[in-house]
Amino acid sequence: MAAYLEKCLSGAINQTAHQRRYAVSLESIVPNLPLLGTYQPMLQSLWRDGLFGPADERYFRLVDRSEGMSQLFNQESLRGTSNYSSFDSFQRIFNRPELHSLVNQMTYFDLKGSLPALLHVEDRTSMANSIESRVPLLDHRIVEFLATIPPNIKFSGGRVKHLFKESVRSAVPLTSFTVKTKWASPHL
């Protein structure tokens, strides 16, 4: 949501928000901005440099955690990696031509680049500490179907998980939609 907020601000300022086929407008996400309350330090860092720059550079900056990593490794083990660019690897996933919107680009990268590692860590840490944990729906048919739906339908009115909530509304108690989390979740 943080990266998309920047794109919506840019669209509102430049009056281009409604030119894209799959645009989600700034007006539609305003009601959900309180979700970013605990992310203010991250937003300050993200917006400090390059605000409104190219989408791939901005999102990479948001998700990149490699700063200082080379200090953790024996320098001899890093020989032969000088030509490797994590940004180039990121771009190959993020800038696929069939991804027609920023939301789809971010979602696709998260699915291909982040989800496998997150699931691995989630599984290990929850099992090691005997904690019951929630994992996302992993049925590939659902994921593939959702990838075909335009973001303005998935996030109608700027609401996070709108389509999911509407699809399970008749099967899940209404109280499930109104319960507030007791702690800040790092995931959006």
Image (spheres, grey):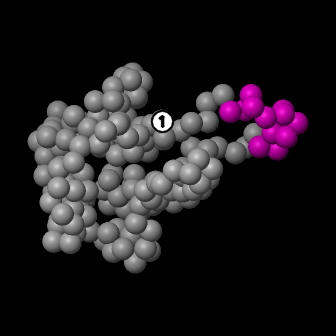
In the displayed structure image, the side of residue 55 where residue 65 appears, left or right = right
Q: Residue at coordinates 33% horizontally, 51% vertically from top-left?
A: 102
Q: Which residue is mark 1?
A: 61
Pinpoint residue 129: horizontal percent, then vertical percent: 59, 47
Q: Position of residue 37 (x, y in %)?
A: 28, 30
Q: Position of residue 97 (x, y in %)?
A: 41, 62
Answer above or below: position of 181 versus 23.
above
Q: Is residue 107 magenta?
A: no
In the image, residue 126 sits, relative to residue 31, either above or below, namely below
Question: What are the residue bounds of the magenta stretch?
Answer: 69-81
Q: Is residue 1 left or right of residue 27?
A: right
> Is residue 167 in sight in this rendering?
no
Q: Going by the image, does 5 lie left or right of 92? A: left
Provide the secondary structure element on which disc 1 rests: helix
10 Å crowding of disc 1: few (<14), some (14-19), many (20+): some
Q: Position of residue 40 (x, y in %)?
A: 33, 26
Reply above or below: 71 against 129. Answer: above
Is residue 77 highlighted in magenta?
Answer: yes
What amino acid is at disc 1?
A: Arg
Residue at the spot 81% in from the left edge and 39% down from the top edge: 78
Residue lying at the far front in this picture: please name it.
130
